Each structure stands twice: as C-alpha cells, then as structure tokens.
Amino acid sequence: MTTPTSSTGLRIARVLPDLCLLAAMPLLVYSVHRVFMSTPIEQSMGTAFKIFFFHVPMGWLCMLMALISGIAAAVQLRRRSSGAAAVALAAAEIGFVTGLGVLLTGPIWGNATWGKPWTGDARQVSTALLWLVIVAYLLLRHYGPRSSDRLAAALAIFGAVNVPLIYYAVTLWKTLHPSTTVVASLPKEMWMTFWPGLGGLLLVSLGLLGLRIRQLRLADELDAAWVQLEDPPR
Amino acid sequence: MRLLRQALLLLRSELRQELRDFELLLTAGFFTVVLLAMFYLSFASLQAKAHLHALPGLMWLTVAFVGVLTLTRVFDREREADTLRALLAAPIDRLAIYLAKAAMALSVLMVCCAVLVPGLWLIFPAAQAFADQPGQTALLALLGCGGYVAIGTLFAAGLATGAGKNTLLFIILYPLTTPVLMYALVTTRALIDRDPGLPGHLMQMFVLDVILFAAACLLFETVLIGAPVRPHRRPPLRPSVHRDMSREPSR
C-alpha cells in the first residue's frame, strides 16, 4: 500500500524526464537561432567562436555527469543499491556523449584559434583522460564479470575525482585554454545566447538521464521477476 | 600494528612462493629486457637530442607495460588455486591482503627498474643524469611505481574475484594511472634537465601517492566483498519483485 503523497511523487518522477525533454525543445531552437542569427561575430576569433556556445555547455555537462556518476557509485558501494547503480551507469552514458562532443568541437575551435587542433594543453589532456575513464567504466559495466559492478563503481569514483582537476587545470598549469572566468566576463548579447543553450542542453541531458534510469530499473525488475519465476520462493 | 604484522606475514608468504620458482621476477625482468631491446632497435639511430625527449616516455611506458603483467600475475596465482576466497574468509584484516599484494608488486617493479634504468643508460648516453643522481633516480622510480601499484592492486584484486576477463585490467588501468605517469614523466624530465625544482616535483608525486593509497585502502574491502549488510529498520510494506536481495537481513 502506498500513501497518496508517495504515489503523487512517483507520478511526478515518472513524467519529469518527458517534461524536461519537452521544455528543452523551444530552448534549443531559440538558442541555435540566437547563436547564428543574433549574436555578433567575435572580433579576434571570428565565426569559429560560435563553437563556444556548444563546446562549453557540453564540457560542463560532461563534468556534471561524471560527478553524478561518481556520487551515485559511492552510494551504490555504501548501500548496495541497485537504483544508485542505474543512476551511475545512466550518468556515465550521458557523460560519454557530452565528452565526445567536447573532444570533437574543441579541436575544431583550437584549430581556428591557435592554428593547431591539439596542443597537449592541460585541460585538453585531463578532459580526454576523464572521457577515457568513462569509456573504461562503460566497458567494465557491459563486458565485465558479474562481480565487476563494485569495481566499476570504484572506477567512477576515481573519474569524479578527476573533475575538480579539469576545472582548475587552466589555473594550476597556466595553459592556452581560456580561464574559468571567461563566461562571467561575456558581453550581454553573448551571455543571453549562452545561458538558454546551456539550459536546453542541461534539460535534454536530465531528460535522457531520467529515461535511461527508468529503463535500467525496468530491466532489473524484469530480471528479478524472471528469477522469481524460475526459482519461486518456498 | 596488528595490520602491519598481518601484512608482513602475507608478504613473507608471497616472497617465499616467489623464491621457489622466481616466476614473477623472471617474466617481468625478461619482459623489461625485451622492451629495452625494442627501444634500442627503434630509437638508437636517432640524434642524442631526440633521446633526451624520448627517455622519460620510454622509462614510464616500460613501467606501465611491466606493471600490468606483474599485477595480473600476482593475482593469477590466487585465482588458479582459488585461494583469494580463502584469504578473504581468513580471520585477518582485509587491508593486510591489499598491503601485502601492493608491496609484492612494488618490489617486482623496483627490481625491473633496477634493470631498466641502467639499461637505458647503456643504450642512450643521454641518460647519464640517471647515473649522476642515483638517489633521486631511485626515489623517482619508487614514487612513480608506488602510485601505479596503489591503483593497480585495487583493480587487479577486483578483477581477480570475478570469473575470467582479466584482460579488462589493461582497459581500466591505463586511463586511471595516466595522471601518475604524467607526473612521473614531468619529474623525470626535470631530473634529466637537472632542474633545481626537482625536489618540489618529487614532493608532488609523494602527495599524489599518499592520496591514491588512502583512496585505494578505503575502497579495497568494499570493492572486493561489498559493504557490510545492514538489516532493514522496518519490514517492507508489500512484497515486491524488484527488492534488492542483498539488503535482506541474514537469517
């Protein structure tokens, strides 16, 4: 028996991912329109600067997803929670996609700005490393032995530890990369383009995260039901 | 003290086993020599200036390759005899297992470094700095291998408890140990260049090693056998097919 409050909560949790995706649609259309039609071209970097509006949000989302995955993995280890394991896996998958986006758009922007797609810059290297850790985590979760979930969780925790290193890499190692304060110092018209884009991509990520978690939980329930059918309790 | 005594006891058993057939030392040592021969064939004809740039990479790539081989073999012994389960069930602190295995892997890697560093010096004259600063070189090797082993032992142990798929260690270990190896590369470069900032680099490596060892010690038991099972505070309201069976109270 469930209380009315918990059943309302469950219903909200069920429709939340769909709501996120629905809300993201107009934001993304508005953001893309602003990037290409309303935002002035940056003086020193030219048209290539427009990549910034996709590259930076994807970088932030990749770090956010790695953090979510690491925290969920810690909860999974501490409480043996299959729900937390599903959150960790789903967040890592979204982190994989956003990380790939960062690693693809970064060199395009770098080539236009620095004349070289890859400079071995500390933030480039640490982001690539984070992405490799996410890939290793996904490989272990999908192809590892049955007991490897705990091992994968430890891997996700190490990945999350990498996040502050990436964020402060430009400060610690004085690299070519723009500093962490660049977004705050944007002129108003660029600022007005950046935040809707970030909001749209964030909503898409959260929506996909929610859907994937639900799918993984359903797969778990299906497995458990199958086991119960094969081996009913006496 | 008890933990240390247990770890030393396990390490002594590991060493005794190793001294019976020298399997780890011979395979890892031979692999180091093979890598040195391959480096010689590939890079000896390059100019001395290029050797200076290549040396740190050659040294730590060798450690990375030999390290995986060693860590796999350290736990393969337990897997083959199915003794890891027995060790985990024994009335000892599980952390002692981690410490003993890490110390064993570190010892083997240090022996390999004792072959590798003079080997590099013989092949590439640019490695003269290693011979000029033996103390710093030994400390660098110890700190670099220490960080590598700290993470490696945790994940090798985790994979050893499962069935098969030991090849996954290569996939996990390289992305995770790259920060340690990067620090080691920068420090080796400072050593070769006789940089006065070398002690600072070595200190950074030491701090990184301490952090990695602490993290691995915290995670070891949980990764290997899972968190202790805690009983439910109250019984579930209704039977559910998707409840987490591992959280059920033991009867």
Image (cartoon, coloured by chain):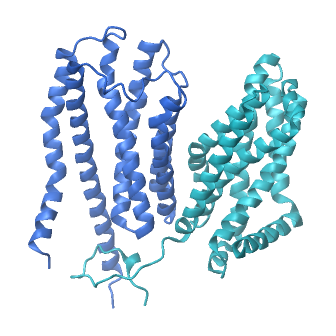
Chain colours: A blue, B cyan
Is residue A25 among what the camera can see? yes
Q: Is residue A59 left or right of residue B156?
A: left
**In the rendering, at what x and y percent does residue B179 appear?**
59, 40
Quadrant for residue B200, please give it.
top right
Q: Nearer the viewer, residue A224 or A11?
A: A11
Q: Nearer the viewer, residue A218 or B249?
A: B249
Residue at 14% across, 27% down: A30
Q: Is residue B153 left or right of residue B15?
A: left
Q: Locate the C terminus of chain B and report the quarter of the image it occupies.
A: bottom left
**In the rendering, at what x and y percent does residue B7 appear?**
73, 70
Residue at 83% across, 65% down: B15
Q: Locate the N terminus of chain B and report the quarter of the image it occupies.
A: bottom right
Position of residue B108 relative to residue A63, above or below, is: below
**In the rendering, at what x and y percent does residue A200 appear?**
21, 36
Quadrant for residue B128, please give it.
top right
Q: Is residue B169 left or right of residue A140?
A: right
What is the number of callouts on the image?
0
Position of residue B70 relative to residue B194, above or below, is: below
**In the rendering, at what x and y percent does residue B108 appear?**
80, 54
Position of residue B85 relative to residue A34, above or below, is: below
Residue at 13% across, 40% down: A23
Quadrant for residue B119, please give it.
top right
Q: Is residue B234 left or right of residue A38?
A: right
Is residue B46 among what the camera can see? no
Q: Nearer the viewer, residue B66 or A119?
A: A119
Position of residue B78 relative to residue B54, above or below, is: below
